[in-house]
Each structure stands twice: as structure tokens, then as C-alpha cells.
Image: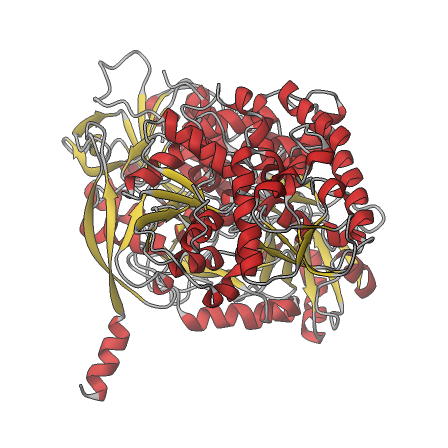
Amino acid sequence: MSAVEQLAETEAGQTRTLRVSRWKPGDTLPHYEEFTVSYDERTALVEALRQIRLREDPSLMIRHSCLHGSCGTCGVRVNGREVLGCLTQVADLPPGPVTVEPLENAPLLGDLVVDMAPAYRRIEPAGLFPVRPTDGVSRPAPGVKQLTQFQDCLECGLCASACPVSSVDPGFFPAALWAAAAAVEQRGANLSEDDALWLCTTCANCLRVCPEGIDMTQVMPAIREVAVGDGRVPAELQDVFEKSFRYGNCLGENPRRRHAWTRDAGVDVRVLPNDPAPVDVLFYVEDYWSYHPRGQTAARAFARILSTLGVDFGILGPEEKTLGDSQRLAGEKGLFEALMDDVVATLGRYQFNRIVTPDPHGFNALVKEYPKRGHQYQVLHYTQFLAPLVDRIDWKKRLDVTVTFHDPCYLGRHNGEYDAPRRLLQAIPGVRLVEMGRCRENGYCCGGGGGGMWLDSLTKDYMSERLSERRVREAAATGADVLAVCCPYEVSLFEDAAKSTGNDHLAVRDIVELIDEAMGNGAGA
Amino acid sequence: MRDPGSGGEGPRGSRPHVLIVGGGGTGGAVAHDLTLRGVAVTLVERGELTSGTTGRHHGLLHSGARYAVKDAESAVECIEENRILRRIAPGSFEENDGLFVAVNDDDMDYMPSFIDACQRSDIPVRQLSRAETLALEPNLNPELRGSVQVPDGTMDAMRLALRFFATAQANGARIRAFTEVTSVVTSARSVTGVMVRDRRTGRDERLDADIVVNATGPWSESLARMAGVDVPIQPSPGVLVALRGRVVNMVINRLHPAGDGDIVLPQRNLAVVGTSSWVVSDPDDLGVPEDHVQTMRREGSKLVPAVATMEQWAAWSAARPLIGEGGASSGRELSRTFKCFDHKERDGVEGFVTITGGKATTLRGMAETTANVVCAKLGLEAPCQTRETPLLPYSRYYLEEVA
């Protein structure tokens, strides 16, 4: 190619093929049409779509207005991920096929255009003013009125498209909860007694897609705290708060029986209060592995794995209390802080090098909240602890199963760990890992986070199906034999969901149970 | 999109029917004005509302100060409309005022004539020292010499326009987005309606009207051509650059004759720098010239140094619908005022009116002028009510049950 030809090619720009979802009233299902668009480094996706409409197919329906991420009209999904078309450069699209689809969880008007009316039906009752006083850098001079700023939320609907609750409850809209929270904070508005307050699982999928970075995992505890202060807490959640306060665990179990599971572990488990010598790994068992029968089998499996690998570990036994993260996110900040004080005092009595916990929620608290009390320990989720040791495992048994893996929200999106669990699964002889459509950053929530674990009788009335049920159907659709998990909330949620959705053939196993079985301990099932 | 209903206008009632083409701020304001005067209104827009120039302009509620020295007519229009809009659309603006900032001796020399021109156009001004200026906006260029405070503001460009649509719709106007005009129906030198294609259903319809209003901004030439007339419109795009971070709360202008990249203003959590000016023939094909983006950064950073290094959020172009008979080179020399053409007077074609030119700030005034022309043609004696009629919240556009 001559220099002139090269130059001509550069000037003409590159081309990219977009697979665009098409649907008009009367169509049963959307179909896809391919369009080739030319672009340069400044071509936004919305501009490429506009060029298709103007040059190739004027019937293509798209929404756009400001072209710079201020109006919120041009939301679409690109390869399943919610984006604003104006802030997405064609040059930055991932290699391979690019599919452009309308937002989910909103009525479709045509092609890429959804109806925003249901969203505004939720947002408007919050009564939020469009502008608010600034908290910015400027200081009003004497005689100058208070400076103002438009609200942050663009009302783009990306959050609702990504939200697992919105997918089973069309009346739920994360941005409306944000508006309600903002109205409480800025105007002293009375918090709505709307049950929507309790539906959010703080899974953070909305934060992943929000162009303004609005963090519902900060908003939710704050507005729930107001409801808790007003005594407006669902009875089943109040029960958990009281149990957590009285017994130090959410299940209301006897603290003295916290290490009862160790009796059948088949290996010695050092209980530090009985033997307080320094230890390498403090295994922070948390509530469900301590008390729930299916959690206990995982705890035993983990103890056997640690023992086989020669890890020096111990547990707090009767002195362990829940780390309290889900209670915090459910709005009981006072309870959480009391628990944190107790836990920090207990930890201070022992010497250890690191904490390893199976519970992504407790892990999240240790990483993000406990340092506020001066805690400096190295903290690992058990998958992060085991993954570097996996080459040392002497495998005894080939499992020959197809496994799909559910990313826990609090390990994945909240703390960025997607690889350690997969590394473990792929190391197990005979495990074929297949991914669900929504995985890793886009993983679908099990419904247990942010207090959801303890609100089933309230939330199920609002949802066409439980999040765990939808997730299990997704897992079953992969053809997997096993749904592997690494969060103690998930085993019981998914086992119930497998039964209720007629997917009994799908076994729900913690990753440690699979490892333990493949190590020949045979106690996994 | 509201009103997904289809089918042409039914048998004409006793009320005259006006069809407005163009779902930008001007079309919305004309629909609002005419419905208040008792006219039956249908508005069609080929895409989503505000998907043309309206959504992507700078978002500046002008005080008129920017035009005071060179274009007093525009300046007076702006300050009048600025006051009216604050009254009828509270909540749609950040009412933080604006600063015209002098950064060198030339700018300081310009200050007296600037202040004098503002005062002649009834634009309130307050001269600020360097220290007073920096107290208000600490991120401004510390080398600045002084500034003049004026009642500029910023707006949510789309949502201000939606309030006109919402109010018009609540008063009975039919607003039809995704409905594209495919031809103008004429009979004996008279426009009698338009043919449209509904982009949802794919159906073609004829919409009859007593008068068709061309409110398509920079696209008004192509619609006028369908009616067999021309309008002296010059699409003149400008580049805008949005940077991540809210470094100012007020509208920051350079205190000098209007030029490129000399306005930095806040929008939500962004700083938006604008703009440039050139002329094109096709308002659908603008592009974003890289050298213009660099100019925005360079000139903007003279006002707010952080502009040179802030994360770029988006760069885009918007086409102004400036009035000019062609031959303009940059668009800067063209007036920012608006014109309403009755094509009966101009071209001998009855039933067709074009409103163009103008600015977002003057959208209500443009609508008033247009509705005056339309009502005179219809023989309707109904005074304008939009100066005092508060607009509904923008969300009502989506929420209103369409009859």
C-alpha cells in the first residue's frame, strides 16, 4: 500500500459492524440487523447510530439529546452492558461482535427506545427539586445568594436496566430511591413508608453502570437508618437485629455452640480461647458456616483442606461474633458499631498473621469498615487464600462434572475478586467450567445481600420470582450439573430455588466442598 | 415518546389547526403559546424530542451581556426573556449569575464599554475586584485583573424544553415524536398540510392543517424547500467540550469581544467549554474538528487553568440556526436574533410560517412572535399568555395521560 493510499485509508476512518436490535409494535420478538459504520477516534456510539438512521435506515428509533452525558436519554446496552451512547466511543468497543440493544426492565416503544413513564411515576413522588445548594468550591460573597447545582442523577434508567430487583419487580427503580434519599437529606422530607426501601440488595450492579457514580450501597444504609430510628422495620428483620444483638449471630443460636461443627470435621481445629498461642491463620467462620447445616459441611471441608495443606489455623469459637456487614447495610448502624467494638476487642486478645473468612459480607466489612477502628490485619476471602496454594494439592479423585459459578456480589463487584474462585474450580480434576451470561462484573445477585437474606416474606410479595430462582434457572440453562458458590448465604438460597423451580438435578456446592471431595475426603456430599 | 396513537387529524372542528414541524425548544414553545390561545396544535418531530440543536447547546441562560457591545437587539431580547423564564420555569436554572473575567490589559480596556453597553440594554452589572472575583470562584486564573458580574445562568437544556411540551400536551396539544415529515402538501400556492411517516408503525399519514409552522432550526431550509420556498438560514455549528469535574459554579465568560472557547460553565458535575463557529450546508453532518477541541482547551484554560488538564468527558458539535443570506465565513458575524417569516409575504405561499435564528434563551419570545403571526393569519384575536403562565414540571411530559 502506498503512502497516499495509507493516508486515504486513515482519512476515510475505520469501520465497525454493529448488530442492532430491531422491534416495532406488533412484532413478537426483537430481531437483529447488522450495520457497518465508519468512525474515528471521536465517534461516539450515539453518533454512529445517528448516522445509521440518517444514511441507511430512517426507521431506526433512537433517543439522544445532549451528547455529553448530562441529559440521560441515550442509554442502551452494548453486549449486555448498560452505557450512555454519547459517552461510549466506537473506537473503545471490545473486539468481536458488538450488539446494541435497548435498556431492560422498561416498556419498549420501538427499536432502541424505551418508555420512561414508569420511571418518572416512581421518581416524581419523591418530590426532589431539580436543583440544590452547591457543596462545591465556591463561597458566596457577602450579598450573593446561595449557589446552586443541578441534581446528580441523570434519570437515564441505566440503573433499573441493570438492577436485579427491577427485573422481577417493574415498580422498583433505583434512581427513585436515590431521589427519596436526597429529598430526606436536602429537604428534611419524610421518608416514604414505601416497602421499596427494603427491596434493594445493595448488589452494586447499578453503581457499575451509573454515569454519575451514584452509590446505592452508601444511600441504602443511610435511608434505612432513618426508618430504623423511626421504628419502621419489617418484623422479620427486627428479629434478626435482636438476635444479632443478643447472641452475636443472626440466627439466634447459642454462642457456646459456635464451634460445634468442628466435632465432625475429622481433623483437629484449634479453638483459640482454649489454646491462645499465636497462630498463622485466623479462620473467621461467620454465622452460616458456624450454624447452618449446609454451612457446617462447608466449614468442615475447609478445615480438612487447611489441615491437609499443613496450614496453622485456629478459630475464635465461642468468642466469635458476626462481623455484622449485612446488619449495617440493612440500616442498623448502631448494632453494627457495637458488634465492631466487640469484634475488635476480641481480635486484640490474639496473635495471628491474617484473617481468612468464607463470608464475602464479613470480608467486605473487615476490608472497608473495620479499618476505621484502627484494625490493620491482612484479610483474605478463602478463595484468595487457597488459590495460590492450589498447586500443592494432591488430588485423589476426578469429579467429571460441568460446573457454573455464581459470583458473590460482595466478593466480585464490591471487592474486585473474580479470578480466585475460577482458578480453584479450574484446578479441580474433571471440572468443566461454563459461565452464565451474566457473570463477573455483571453477575446477577442471589437476593441475599443488604438484608435481603432476612426479608423474604416481605420481598417475595413484590417480585414475580425470587432473585435466587431466576439465577438458578440461568444456571440450569447452561447445562451445568453443579452450581458452585463461595458465599455462605447462597447454598441455602439456591438449594431452595432449585427445588421451587423444578431444577432439583442442579447440585449447589460450595467450592470448598468440591475441592474437599476431589482431595479424596469423600465428605463433600 | 408520548401519544403513540396514529391516524390523521379527524374532521376539522371549529378550532383552527396548526401543525408544527420540529420538536426542539422553539417548536415546544410555539405549541405551548398556541394552545393557550385556543388553537388546536399537532407537533411532529422526526426523532426524540430535543434531539437536534436544543439538547446539545451550551446550556447557558444568557443575560444578554455577551451580545451587548455588538448586537444590542439580541442583548435586549436575552435579558427580557431571561427574567421571564426565571419566573415561569423555576427550578430549571442554576441561578448562579455569570462573570465576565478580565485576564489582561486589553480585557480591562474593554471593561468600560462593556459595562456601558450592558447598562444601555438594561442588564444589571456589578464590577468586582480581583479578590472579590476569586472569592466567588477560586478556580479562576489567579492572574485575572477583575470581573463584571451579570445575571447569566445555566439550564438543563432538555428539561427546560420538556416543560413547554409538558404544558402544551396538558392543554391538549398532540406531541408526536418519531414522526417524520416526508413531504409538504400544497395546493395552489398554499400549504395545506404534511405527509408524515410514523417511525413506530411505519405508516404514512396526511396531516391537514390551516397553517404549518417550520420550527426545524438549522434544518428549516430543507423543510422550506419541500414547500417550494427558501429561508435564509445558515447552519453554523460550534464545538463544545465537557470535562469531568465541577470547577466553577457560575458562567465564566472572557471579558472581550465574543470569540472561540471563551465560555466555561457548570453542568451537573461537568465543566463545559464552548464554543467555536463555522458554517456548513448539512446540519446532520457536523463532525468534531480536533483543532477546535484543542482551541476549547487552550482558550478555556486562560479562564480556568484546570481546563487544560481535566479528564475529557465528551466533545460534540451543535448547529446554530443563524440567519444569513449565505456567504458568511465563520458565523460569528451573524446576528443571534431571530426572525419569523410569513411565506405569504416573502414568497407568495400561503399557510406556511418559518421561525428561525434565535437562541435557547429567547425560545419563549420566538414563540410569541410566531404565534402572533399565526394568529393574525388565522384572524384570531387572542393575546399571548406565556409571559405569566408557569410551566409544568418536565416529568409531566412523560406522566401526562394522553387523551
Q: Position of residue A214 (x, y in %)?
A: 58, 45
Residue at point 74%, 38% (across, down): A336
Is residue B249 in sight in this rendering? no
Q: Position of residue A505 (x, y in %)?
A: 31, 34
Q: Residue furthest left?
A: B188
Location of the C terminus of chain B by quadrant is top left
Compared with residue B376, is residue A33 higher up or lower down, i.e. above or below?
below
A19 and A453: which is toward the camera? A453
Q: Is residue A347 left or right of residue A125?
A: right
Compared with residue A165, is residue A141 higher up or lower down, i.e. above or below?
below
B312 and A224: which is toward the camera? A224
Compared with residue B293, is residue B72 higher up or lower down, i.e. above or below?
above
Q: Is residue A240 left or right of residue A302?
A: right
Q: Is residue A329 left or right of residue B199?
A: right
User: Residue A321's image quarter?
Assistant: top right
Q: Position of residue B15 (x, y in %)?
A: 33, 15
Location of the N terminus of chain B by quadrant is top left
Q: How many marks?
A: 0
